[in-house]
Image (tube, helix red, strand yellow):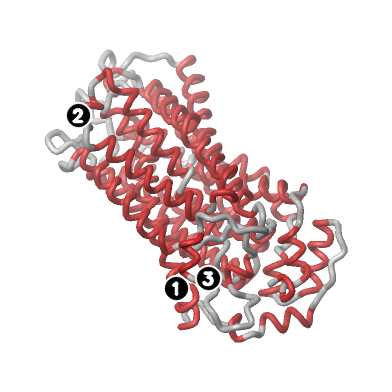
Amino acid sequence: MAGDQLQVLHALDLAKTQWYHFTAIVIAGMGFFTDAYDLFCISLVTKLLGRIYYYEGTDTPGVLPANVAAAVNSVAFVGTLSGQLFFGWLGDKMGRKKVYGMTLMVMVICSIASGLSFSDDPHAVMVTLCFFRFWLGFGIGGDYPLSATIMSEYANKKTRGAFIAAVFAMQGFGILAGGIFAIIVASAFKAKYDVAAFNDDHSGSTPHQADYIWRIILMFGAIPAGLTYYWRMKMPETARYTALVAKNAEKAAKDMARVMQVDIEAEQGKVIEITEKSTNTFGLFSKEFLRRHGLHLLGTTTTWFLLDIAFYSQNLFQKDVFSAIKWIPDAKNMSAIEEVFKIAKAQTLIALCSTVPGYWFTVALIDRMGRFSIQLMGFTMMTIFMFALAIPYDHWKKSENKMGFVVLYSLTFFFANFGPNSTTFIVPAEIFPARLRSTCHGISAASGKLGAIVGAFGFLYLSQDPKKPQQGYHKGIGVKNALTILAVVNLLGALFTLLVPEAKGKSLEEMSGENDDNDVDAVRLEDVSKVAADEPNST
C-alpha cells in the first residue's frame, strides 16, 4: 500500500512523535477544553437560576419549570448538532483550517453573551440565555469534526489513536475546570455574602449578588477559547486535504516539509492519478458509498447516539441523582450560594476521580488494545454498573450506603471515558475518505448529540418521583427505573459496536480504500473478528 501512497502522506504515517504533534494536540485540545466547560457548566447553575428567577414565596426554594429546565439544559445540544452537520460539511468543502477559526470566534462571542442577559423578567433572561447558548453550541459543534479530522490527518499511524484521544481527553479537564472555577466563585461570594439557609430565611437565602455567580461561570468559557485563536490561524492546512481534496501536491509537500523539517517531493501527477480513480470520486449519497462505508457509518452513528443518551444524562443530572441519595443536602437546608458550592464540589470529585482518569487510560492503551476492544469493554462495564445501581437502588438510598453508590456511579463515568465516549470520537476520523471525512464525522457526532438531547429531556422527566415529583414536573418512573433504561441503552451500544471496524496500526488511506487499485470494500466486516489480535509489523 505504501508504494501507491503519496510521499508526503507516507512521511506523515511513519514520522516519529515530534513537537508539531504536541502543538496540534494542545491547539485542538484547548478547543475541546472550552467545549466541555461550556456544555457542562450549565448543570452547575440551573438550581441557582431556579432560586433567583422562579421563587414564588412558598416554603420551598424556587426551581426552573420543567419546560424551562429542559430548554436551558438542551438548547446548546441542539446548536451543537446543527454545527456538527454544517461545519463538518464545510470542512470538506473549504478546508479544515479556514473553518477552524470561525468555530472558535463563535464560541468566544457567545460564551460572553450568555452571561449578559440583563433583565429582571425571568422569561426575558431565559430566552436570551437559550438564544446565545444555541449559537454557542453551534460553534462547539464545528469543533468536533474539525479537531478530530485535523488530528487524524496530522498524526502518524502508530500513535494516531493516542493523539486523537489526547485531544478529546481535554474534555475531562474542561469538566474539571468548570467545577473548580464554580467552587472558587461560590467560595468568594460566600465569604462576602454569608447568608442563612433557606429554612432560616426564605428570601434572604438568595442574595441579589448571587445573580452574578452564574454569569461569571458561563462567561469564563470565553478565555481559553480566545487564547488559542492565534495559534489555530497559524496551523497549515492538513496535507491530506491539500493533496487529496484540493489536489495541490506542491502546497501539501511544502507545508509538511516546513512542519516536519524534511525534504518532501511534490507528486502532482500521482495526486491526479489517485484522485481521479473511479473508487475515489463517489459522493456521500451514492450507491458506492453505501456499499463501501454504509455499515461503518451506521455503526459510528448508532453507537455515538446510544452512548450520549447515557453519558449526558449522567453528566447533566448527576446533581439530581446526588440529591436523591442525599449526598447533597436538601435545598431547604442551604443558601443559594452554598448549593452552588456543594453541587460543584460533588461534580469536581466525580471528574477528578473517574472522568479524567478514564480519558487518559484511553490515551495510554488505545494503540495497544485497539478501538473495538476498548469500546466493547466500556459499553459492557457501563451496562454492568448501571444495573448494579438500578436493581438494588433502595439499598443505595440508605445513608450508610451513599459512598457505595457514588463509587459505582463514578465507575460508570470511568468506563464511559475509558470506552465509547473516547472511541466514538476517534473512529469516524479514521475510516472515511478524505473528501468526506469531516462530513461523516459531523454526521456521527450529530447523531451523538441527538442522543444527548434525548438523554437531557428524557432523564429529566423520567427520573421524577412517581409519587412526589419536583415542583412543576409530572410524575415520572423514578431514578431506579431511569437507571435501568440507561443500562439497557448501554447494552444496545455494545451490540452495535460489532459494526465498527478496527483502525489500529493502519493508515487512513488503507482504512478508506483511497489507494486501492481493485474495486473492493475499503474495510471488510470480517476485520472485526481480528481486532483482538495485534497486527505484526503494522507500523
Q: What element carries label 1?
A: helix
Q: Is mark 2 on a helix, strand or loop?
A: helix
Left or right: where 383 falls relative to 111:
left
User: Which of the two discs, 2 and 1, labels the residue nearer the N terminus?
Assistant: 1
The image shows residue 43 at horizontal and vertical percentages of 40, 37
In this rendering, the answer to whether 473 lies above or below 76 is: above
Q: Return the residue at label 3.
A: 523
What's the residue at 77%, 63% (across, down)?
11
Q: Residue 226 carries which label?
A: none
Residue 248 in view in this figure: yes
In this rendering, the answer to whether 463 lies above or below 61 is: below
Q: Quadrant of the N terminus?
A: bottom right
The image shows residue 304 at horizontal and vertical percentages of 42, 56
User: How many numbered discs, if any?
Assistant: 3
Left or right: where 413 falls relative to 54:
right
Q: Which of marks 3 and 1 is in front?
A: 3
- Few, some or many C-alpha atoms within 10 Å of disc 2 (few <14, some 14-19, many ≥20)? few
User: What separation in Å lies between label 3 and label 1 (alpha carbons)?
Assistant: 11 Å
State which quadrant residue 146 falls in.
bottom right
Q: What residue type is labelled 3?
A: Val
User: Which of the two discs, 3 and 1, labels the residue nearer the N terminus?
Assistant: 1
Q: Residue 394 carries which label?
A: 2
Q: Residue 294 carries which label?
A: 1
Q: Which amino acid does label 1 sit on?
A: Gly
> In the orientation shown, which residue stands out farthest toward the left?
467
Q: Which amino acid does label 2 sit on?
A: Asp
What's the residue at 77%, 67% (across, down)?
8
Residue 126 in view in this figure: no
State which quadrant residue 272 falls in.
bottom right
Whether label 3 touches label 1, CB < 8 Å: no
In this rendering, the answer to whether 304 lies above or below 90 is: above
